[in-house]
Structures are given as C-alpha cells and as structure tokens.
Image (spheres, helix red, strand yellow):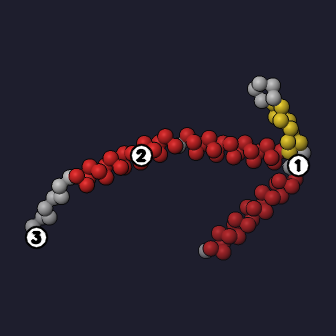
Amino acid sequence: MKALAWGLRAAILLLLLAFAVTNTEPVVVHFVLGQVWQAPLVVVLLSFFAAGGLLGALSLVGVLYRQRREIRRLKGATAKATPLDPAPQ
C-alpha cells in the first residue's frame, strides 16, 4: 500500500513538473493600485495558490484558539466534578 501511495505521489510530482516546464511564458498581473507584476505563468499560479492556502489557514486560527480554550475549560470542569459511585452489581 505504501508503494502505491509513493507511486501516486511520484506521478503527481511528474505531472506538476511537466506543467511547470511547459508554462514558462511570461504573464502580466495588474494589481489594484496600478502595480504591475510580470513573471512566468507557473510562478504566478503557484504564488497565488500558496497565498490562498495561507489566507485559508489564517482564517482558521480564531476558531482553533476558541476550541482549545473551550476544551481546556471543559477539562477543568470535569476534573473538579465529583466522580459518581459505580452502580452496584
């Protein structure tokens, strides 16, 4: 199973490498304030993909901290609670 996973990873890597090699033509990106960025297409795509992943991860930070705080509060509440006597058999 591990060999199959590594084979799939290698195939995806080769496809991405072929995509990068064939898309080296320069493209121009015009930003809002009149700034212009010229770079190969693969660089533009990968940088915007990485920026999207970073923004997505940053949007989860607040939720993650809120959940951790709630878990800590609940663990403290269960530690303070008196244990119930086991049911007689």
User: Is disc 1 placed on a helix, strand or loop?
Assistant: loop
User: Is disc 2 placed on a helix, strand or loop?
Assistant: helix
Q: Is residue 61 left or right of residue 3?
A: left
Task: Work out whether mark 3 precedes mark 1 in sequence or the reverse, and give the earlier one.
Answer: 1
Q: Which mark is residue 24?
A: 1
Judged from this view, the residue extending furthest toward the top is 33
Is 10 placed above or below 48 here?
A: below
Residue drawn at x 74%, y 65% is 11
Q: Are marks 1 and 2 in contact (CB under 8 Å)?
A: no
User: Is disc 3 placed on a helix, strand or loop?
Assistant: loop
Task: Identify residue type, mark 1.
Answer: Thr
Instruction: Point out residue 16 in the picture as x, y percentages from the top left corner.
Output: 78, 57
Give me the C-alpha separation between circle 3 and circle 1.
Answer: 75 Å
Q: Are marks 3 and 2 in contact (CB under 8 Å)?
A: no
Q: Kindly report which numbered mark, 3 or 1, lies closer to the viewer in this rendering.
A: 1
Mark 1 nearby-residue class (10 Å; few <14, some 14–19, many ≥20): few
Q: Is residue 53 left or right of residue 28?
A: left
Residue drawn at x 36%, y 45% is 70
Mark 3 nearby-residue class (10 Å; few <14, some 14–19, many ≥20): few
Task: Work out whether mark 3 precedes mark 2 in sequence or the reverse, and give the earlier one.
Answer: 2
The residue under label 2 is: 67
Task: Work out whether mark 1 precedes mark 2 in sequence or the reverse, and give the earlier one.
Answer: 1
Q: Which quarter of the figure is the N terminus placed in?
A: bottom right
Is 79 placed above or below 30 here?
A: below
Q: Nearer the viewer, residue 81 or 25?
A: 81
Give me the C-alpha separation between circle 1 and circle 2.
Answer: 44 Å
The residue under label 3 is: 89
Identify the image quadrant of residue 65.
Answer: top left
